[in-house]
C-alpha cells in the first residue's frame, strides 16, 4: 500500500546556504529523510510505505498517521521500520498520533547530527501566498524525489486545517516534508485532489510542532490504548464541527410549498442541481440542494469517518398517478440505499427504524415519514454512523425528500441533529 503525505523539514545547523535550487535543498536535507515501512510476517515483507523526516538529534521523526495506522491498530501483526537514502535501516517506535491532523511522531534508536527545523513564519500561519516550497518523499517506492511547488495558504472551504500546495505529490510521499528555500519545514505532505491538476495539501507545521512537543514532554503512547485515544480524538472533532453547525446563521430556502434553512459556514460547500432540462422529458422534476463538509478522517483502509452531508430534493410530479408517485418516493427512501449494505469488519451491521412523524399542529409542518439507520464502531466506544431520510407525506403532486448523513458522531449529537432536521421542515409562508 502506497501512501501520499506531507513531511515537515527544517534547517539543520549546517544548512545556512545561499543557494536555493532544488538540487541544493535536496542535497542538504537528504540525511534527514526516511522511508517509513509497515512490515508483516517473519520475512518482514512491506505492507505499506510512506515518508518521514528527522526533527531532533535523538532520533524523533514526523510522518502521517495514515502511514503508521496498521501498526497503531494492530501492533501484534505489523511493525514499523525505516530506511534511509543511504540504505541504512532499523526499527521505529510509535510515540504519539493526531488522527485529526493525520500526524504521527516516531523514534529511531540511533541519534543524528542532521535534522530539520520549523519555519517561524509557517508556524504562525504568516507565510505569504506564492512562497516557493520543495516537497520531498519517496513516491511509488522508486526513490527519494524533490518536487517544486507553491504555498497557496490555508484551504478555506474545509473544516480540517490544510495548506493548499500547488505541486505534484504522489503516493508514497505521505509524511514527507515541504521545505522553504532555507531548508525549514513549512508543512507535511498529506494528500492530493483526484481529478485536479497539481492540487495537493499539507498539514500546517504548528500541528506537527504541537504533537512533537507532546511526544517530547509526555510518556510514550501505550499501544494498548490507541483505540481509546482515537475515539477521544474523533468525538472531540465531531463536537467542534456540530457546535459550529448549531451556532451558524441559517438562510431560509423555499422549495415549492416547503421551507427549509441551510447553515452559512465557510467550510460548508453547497451546490444545486436540477433535471428540468433533461431529454427525454422526465416524469418527475427534481430540484436538489446539497451541502457537505470536507472533513474526512482516515482511521484505516477499511474505515474513513468524519463525513457530513445534507441533501434536500424537491420532487415535482409531471404525469404519474398517485400510486406511481408514491412508489417513486419509496424508491428514493428505500432502506437498501442506506448503511446496512455497506460492510466493514470495524463496523456493526446497520439497524434501521421506520416511523411516521406528525407536527403538533397541521399548520406547523407536513406529515413526515422518517427512516433512521445507524451502525456502531466495533472498536471505538461511543461512535456511530447515522443516515436518515425524511419524506413529506402530504401530496401526490410534490414532495420534499431530505437525507442527512453523519459519520463518526456520538449518539447524543446524532439524535440532536436528526431532531433539528425534522423540525426544520416546515410549510412555506
Image (cartoon, rainbow, N blue to C red):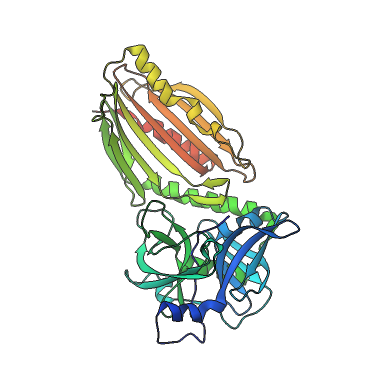
Q: Is residue 240 left or right of residue 395?
A: right
113 up-or-down from 326: above or below = below
Q: Residue at x 40, y 85 (%)?
A: 19
Residue 297 shown left or right of residue 128 in the figure: right
Q: Is residue 354 left or right of residue 152?
A: right
User: What residue is drawn where x is 64% and y is 51%?
Assistant: 227
| Quadrant assignment for the C terminus | top left
Q: Residue furthest front?
A: 142
Going 42% across and 21% down the picture, which residue do you hit?
Answer: 330
When the figure is inspected, residue 200 is found, relative to residue 206, above or below; the finding is above
Residue 119, above or below 160: below
Residue 172 locus on image (x, y percent): 53, 61
Count of numbered tags: 0
Q: Residue at x 54, y 56 (%)?
A: 99
Q: Quadrant of residue 202?
A: bottom left
The one nearer the camera, 128 or 83, is 83
**Quadrant of the image containing the N terminus:** bottom right
Q: Is residue 383 visible?
A: yes
Image coordinates of residue 22 in percent, x first then y, are 42, 77
- Would you say residue 55 is visible in this rendering? no
* Residue 251 place in picture, x, y as percent: 28, 41
Q: Depth check: 341 or 204 in front?
A: 341
Residue 132 shown left or right of residue 229 in the figure: left
x%, y% of residue 322? 33, 13
Amino acid at each position: 500500500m502506497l501512501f501520499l503525505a506531507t513531511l515537515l523539514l527544517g534547517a539543520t545547523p549546517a544548512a545556512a546556504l545561499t543557494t536555493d535550487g532544488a538540487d541544493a535543498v535536496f542535497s542538504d536535507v537528504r540525511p534527514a529523510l526516511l522511508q517509513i515501512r509497515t512490515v508483516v510476517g517473519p520475512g518482514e515483507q512491506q505492507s505499506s510505505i510512506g515518508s518521514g523526516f528527522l526533527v531532533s538529534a535523538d532520533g524523533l521523526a514526523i510522518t502521517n498517521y495514515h502511514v503508521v495506522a496498521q501498526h497503531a491498530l494492530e501492533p501484534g501483526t505489523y511493525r514499523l521500520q525505516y530506511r534511509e537514502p543511504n540504505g541504512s535501516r532499523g526499527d521505529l517506535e510509535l510515540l504519539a498520533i493526531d488522527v485529526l491532523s493525520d500526524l504521527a511522531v516516531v523514534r529511531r534508536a540511533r541519534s543524528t547530527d542532521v535534522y530539520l527545523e520549523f519555519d517561524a513564519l509557517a508556524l504562525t500561519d504568516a507565510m505569504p501566498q506564492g512562497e516557493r516550497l520543495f516537497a520531498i518523499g519517496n513516491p511509488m517506492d522508486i526513490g527519494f524525489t524533490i518536487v517544486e511547488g507553491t504555498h497557496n495558504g490555508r484551504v478555506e472551504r474545509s473544516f480540517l486545517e490544510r495548506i493548499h500546495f500547488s505541486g505534484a505529490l504522489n503516493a508514497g510521499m505521505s509524511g514527507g516534508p515541504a521545505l522553504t528555500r532555507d531548508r525549514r519545514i513549512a508543512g507535511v505532505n498529506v494528500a492530493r485532489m483526484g481529478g485536479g491538476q497539481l492540487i495537493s495539501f499539507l498539514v500546517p507545521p504548528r500541528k506537527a510542532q504541537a504533537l512533537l512537543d507532546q511526544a517530547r514532554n509526555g510518556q510514550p503512547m501505550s499501544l494498548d490504548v490507541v483505540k481509546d485515544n482515537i475515539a477521544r480524538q474523533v468525538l472531540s472533532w465531531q463536537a467542534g464541527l456540530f457546535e459550529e453547525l448549531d451556532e451558524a446563521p441559517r438562510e431560509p430556502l423555499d422549495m415549492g410549498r416547503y421551507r427549509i434553512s441551510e447553515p452559512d459556514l465557510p467550510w460548508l460547500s453547497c451546490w444545486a442541481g436540477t433535471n428540468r432540462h433533461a431529454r427525454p422529458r422526465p416524469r418527475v422534476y427534481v430540484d436538489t440542494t446539497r451541502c457537505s463538509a470536507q472533513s474526512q478522517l482516515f482511521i484505516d483502509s477499511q474505515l474513513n469517518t468524519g463525513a457530513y452531508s445534507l441533501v434536500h430534493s424537491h420532487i415535482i410530479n409531471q404525469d404519474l398517478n398517485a400510486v406511481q408517485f408514491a412508489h417513486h418516493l419509496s424508491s428514493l427512501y428505500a432502506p437498501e440505499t442506506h448503511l446496512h449494505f455497506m460492510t466493514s469488519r470495524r463496523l456493526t451491521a446497520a439497524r434501521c427504524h421506520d416511523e411516521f412523524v406528525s407536527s403538533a399542529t397541521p399548520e406547523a409542518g407536513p406529515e413526515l415519514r422518517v427512516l433512521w439507520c445507524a451502525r456502531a464502531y466495533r472498536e471505538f466506544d461511543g461512535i456511530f454512523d447515522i443516515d436518515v431520510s425524511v419524506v413529506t407525506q402530504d401530496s401526490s403532486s410534490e414532495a420534499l425528500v431530505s437525507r442527512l448523513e453523519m459519520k463518526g458522531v456520538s449518539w447524543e449529537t446524532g439524535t440532536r441533529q436528526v431532531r433539528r432536521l425534522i423540525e426544520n421542515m416546515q410549510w412555506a409562508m
